[in-house]
Amino acid sequence: MSDATTNRPMSERLEPYLAIIGPLVMILAVLLFMAVAEPARYFRATNLNLILLDAALYMPMAMAMTFVITQRGIDLSIGSIAALSSILMAFLIKQYGFSVYIAVPIAIMLGALMGLINGLIITRFNVPDLIGTLAMDLVYRGFALVIAKGLVLARFPDFLTEIGRGQIPSFIPIPVIIGIATMIAGYVLLTRSYFGRYTIAIGSNPEAAELTGISVNRHKVHAYVLCGACAALAGVMLTGKLNAIQATSAPYFNLHVIAAVVVGGTSLFGGRASMLGSFAGVLLLSMMINALVTLRIEFFWQSVASGVVIVSSVALYTWMQKKDRDGAGGWLAALTTPDGQKMFRFSAALLGVLIALLAVGALLAGDPNPSG
């Protein structure tokens, strides 16, 4: 290690790792709180398994969404892509007698096709990512409703249920293996390939990337194709987990995945990404939602808590980027500025709201079977 590196202040040396440090600190806070509030129920092996299974469902989409957001894009259609591709897969299996080994790859290819359509609408017709994917979300969901006609398709072959909730004996669940494998693949793509380098370059400055010879539009399309394929994979996993699928499934996939990626440190303004941060963000949201369920807090309050985490995370990373542009000397020094003080008080207030929510749930929680 060079003398220049060793002589740098600790705050500057830690700064590249803030994307992963942030969600890890919040994970630790959730663990400490639940260790006091509900240790017996929260830390049971069966409950930890539920957290992993829930997180695994979002890992493929979080991996792909990291690339889309890093290049200044957004995809609000992943929930509908997951539902439509799974509905079509279910009909191939149930109505037309397709083998599950053929139907699953077809579903993933259909998801990739829908991602391709999204990418072409955005790049060829110059439709903003937000509007284009929101409109296609309505289109794909509408097709799913038309095809399913209100039916709930259920009872699929064992191979599909193994993808969704199977477990290797004396090892971790199969969906967790699939989810972690996609995150590892995404990490390699982001840090060891031209695809990752081009993604960061486009997000940092699309015009400069174009001038260096990068085909910006083609690369954007590739990212949306990847996002569509991963959304379809998540839909297959969801179908296997529930052993059923309907047209209204996966309504909040897009918000959950975007929240996990942003909480993990990937910038909504492009040019900054962290695959490890996205992985930690997925775990954090799954752990937090599970904690709220364990405390018997209503579903609507779960949405409030998720929103608090998202707002505080986006505000923090936006402030950090502004500090970088202004050339302040390290994030610890920036905390002493008026803007830094405001950010600190704002984050503390939001964190206080979240802790108060958890505390109220813990106080109101009671034994549902007091008679034993």
Image (spheres, helix red, strand yellow):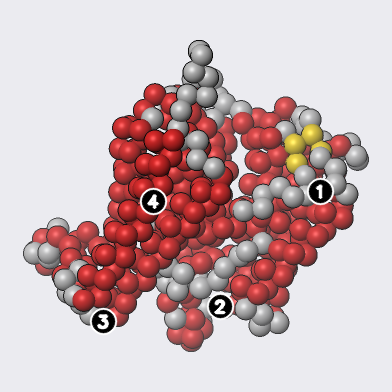
Estimate the x, y position of residue 221 in percent, counting from the top left: 63, 70
Query: How many C-alpha atoms fall within 10 Å of the one at disc 1: few (<14), some, or many (≥20)?
Result: some
According to the picture, the residue beneath numbered tag 3 turns out to be 326
Which is nearer the eye, 138 or 215? 138
Label 2, residues with CA under 10 Å away: few <14, some 14-19, many ≥20: many
SS assignment at label 4: helix
Name the residue carrying label 2. 216
* Image-quadrant location for residue 152: top right
Q: In this image, 354 relative to 116: left or right?
A: left
Looking at the rendered structure, the kind of residue marked 1 is Leu
Check disc 3 and give the amino acid type.
Asp
Q: Amino acid at mark 2?
A: Val
Residue at the spot 30% in from the left edge and 37% down from the top edge:
32
Q: Residue 130 is drawn in which quadrant?
A: bottom right
Tell me if I can see residue 67 in this picture: yes
| Nearest-to-viewer mark from 2 and 4 | 4
Foreground label between 4 and 3: 4
Residue 13: numbered disc: none
How far separated are the C-alphas under marks 4 and 1?
40 Å
According to the image, label 4 marks what residue?
354
Q: Which label's residue is closer to the chain start, 4 or 3?
A: 3
Callout 3 secondary element: helix
Mark sitting earlier along the chain (3/2): 2
In the rendered view of the protein, which quadrant contains the N terminus? bottom left
Q: Which residue is mark 1?
A: 88
State the residue in front, 110 or 248.
248
Q: How far apart in space, not on screen, are marks 2 and 1 (Cα)?
A: 32 Å
Q: Do callouts 2 and 1 mark residues in contact (Cβ within 8 Å)? A: no
Distance CA(mark 3)–CA(mark 2): 28 Å
Circle 1/circle 3 CB separation < 8 Å: no
Of labels 1 and 3, earlier in sequence is: 1
